[in-house]
Image: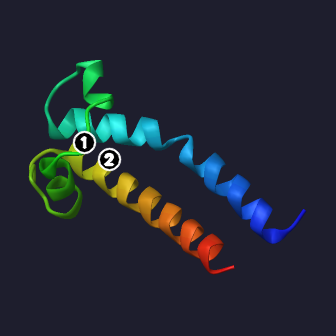
Amino acid sequence: MSIKTVLLILIFAWGIPSTFFRSKFRKIVYQTDDWTINIKPLFIKEIVALFKNIYPNNPDYIKIRNYYRIYLVIYLVLFLIYYNL
């Protein structure tokens, strides 16, 4: 098995928890528990919430946002390594 194949498998495996992180993050950002938030397209408020602090007094938002940021950075690094091989 080549390193590129292993990285591709790792990228797919790392992508599995994305639904969990994105769902929790979106529910906090849009202040809803409705499941349909998970299937809606990307919105500007979500991007702003990822890079800024839109709810500074909400510790759950800050915690989930930071976890989601770390998750996305690792995902990006894996993809860039794969792409450059």
For image coordinates 13% across by 31% down, the residue present is 31
Tell me the quarter of the image containing the C terminus.
Answer: bottom right
Label at residue 60: 1
Residue 29 spot, x, y in % from top left: 17, 41
Could you say where residue 28 lies in the image, as x and y percent from the top left? 20, 36
Residue that sits furthest to the right in the current view? 1
- Residue, x 56% and y 41% (percent of image)? 16
> In the image, which disc is placed on residue 64?
2
Give left or right: position of 73 versus 82.
left
Check the image and report above or below for 40 versus 10.
Answer: above
Three-letter code for the amino acid on which mark 2 is drawn:
Ile
Query: Would residue 44 appear left or right of 36 to someone viewing this image?
Result: left
Label 2, label 1: how many angstroms apart (C-alpha)? 6 Å
Name which quarter of the figure residue 2 lies in.
bottom right
Q: Taking 52 as reference, is 83 left or right?
A: right
The dot on residue 31 is: none
Whether residues under marks 2 and 1 lie with C-beta atoms below 8 angstroms apart, the answer is yes
Residue appearing at x 33%, y 57% in the figure: 66
- Residue 39 lies, in percent from the top left, at 32, 29
